[in-house]
Amino acid sequence: MLTKKKKLSKKEIKEDKLVSFYYKAYGFFDENKSRVLTYAGVLVVLIVAIVFYINHRNQQNKEAGIQLASVLPQYDNGAYLEAIEGHAGTDVIGLKKIVEEYGSTENGETAKIYLANSYDRLGKIDEAFKYYKDYGGSISMYKATALAGQAGYYADKKEYEKAADLYKKAAFVSSSDVLNSDYLLHAGINYINAGKKAEAKSMFEKIRKDYATSSAIAEANKYMTLTE
């Protein structure tokens, strides 16, 4: 005589599925254990490599910061050639070497700006341009400086529209940059030189509107008359 099949509770169904999953998982692992262990080993190696890389990068950035701090007194004193090449007989290796050894770190990227500025002060605008253009750091002030440095290069080459566009771009990197009014002023002047009076006027109007107390306002008002 057939007996009535007992209805399983939700808890029993859940437990039954869990047991079933366990045995399926165990069976899969038993059949593929060599492959699974290989993948697990690769994952462990990858994690270790990532941790090592991050720690190495942090250490490199720290070393770059120490080297940069040691050379900045020469830069601040206007000894630009010494700042570039370093000080013979000392541990001061110079901005060029810092960039070569640590250029991919944040402090190494910062060193590129000081190196470019140093070349610019020495009149070596092609060398300066190379490092301004190569800047890839994340600090807004230096991003704007790099753009303005490139703009100055193009202005010197009489490529005024390129210069103006880059100065304009520099002025909009960060709203808190104290040099924004100067960047806008230079953008306007270069737009005038490029024959683009409407673009120049918009630069001077922005100075009037947003930077009315800046040192650039008097020059902006003077050049505004050239856009009429």
Image (cartoon, helix red, strand yellow):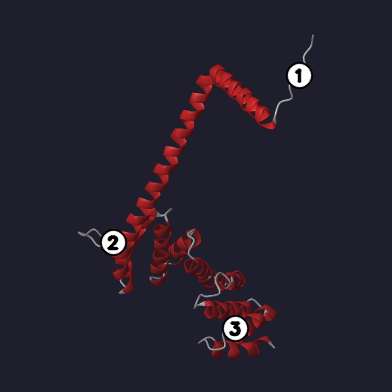
* Dot 2 or dot 1, earlier in sequence: 1
Q: Which sits in the foreground, 204 or 140?
A: 140
Q: Residue furthest right?
A: 1
Residue at x 73% of width, y 21% of height: 6
- Kind of element beneath mark 1: loop
SS category of the residue bearing label 2? loop
Residue type (three-letter) at the residue carrying disc 3 = Asp
**Residue type at numbered disc 2:** Gly
Position of 15 with respect to 59 (left or right) is right
Which residue is depicted at the point 44% across and 65% down?
Answer: 128
Residue drawn at the location 40% of the way across and 58% of the way down: 108
Circles 2 and 1, Cβ within 8 Å, touching? The answer is no
Q: Position of residue 131 (x, y in %)?
A: 45, 61
Mark yes or no: residue 101 visible: no
Q: CA distance from mark 3 to mark 1?
A: 83 Å
Q: Quadrant of residue 189?
A: bottom right
Which quarter of the image is occupied by the C terminus? bottom right
Tell me the SS state at disc 3: helix
Near-viewer residue (198 or 63): 63
Horizontal arrangement in the rendering, residue 94 relative to residue 26 (left or right): left
Left or right of 80: which side holds 4?
right
Residue 5's tag is 1
Q: Earlier in the sequence, mark 3 or mark 2?
A: 2
Task: Please state which amino acid type lies under the numbered disc 1.
Answer: Lys
Residue under circle 3?
210
For the residues marked 3 and 2, what is the alpha-carbon distance in whole angstroms?
42 Å
**29 relative to 110, above or below:** above
Mark 3: few/some/many CA within 10 Å (<14, 14-19, 20+):
few
Q: Residues within 10 Å of mark 2 (few under 14, many from 20)?
A: many
Q: CA distance from mark 2 to mark 1?
A: 90 Å
- Image quarter hosting the N terminus: top right
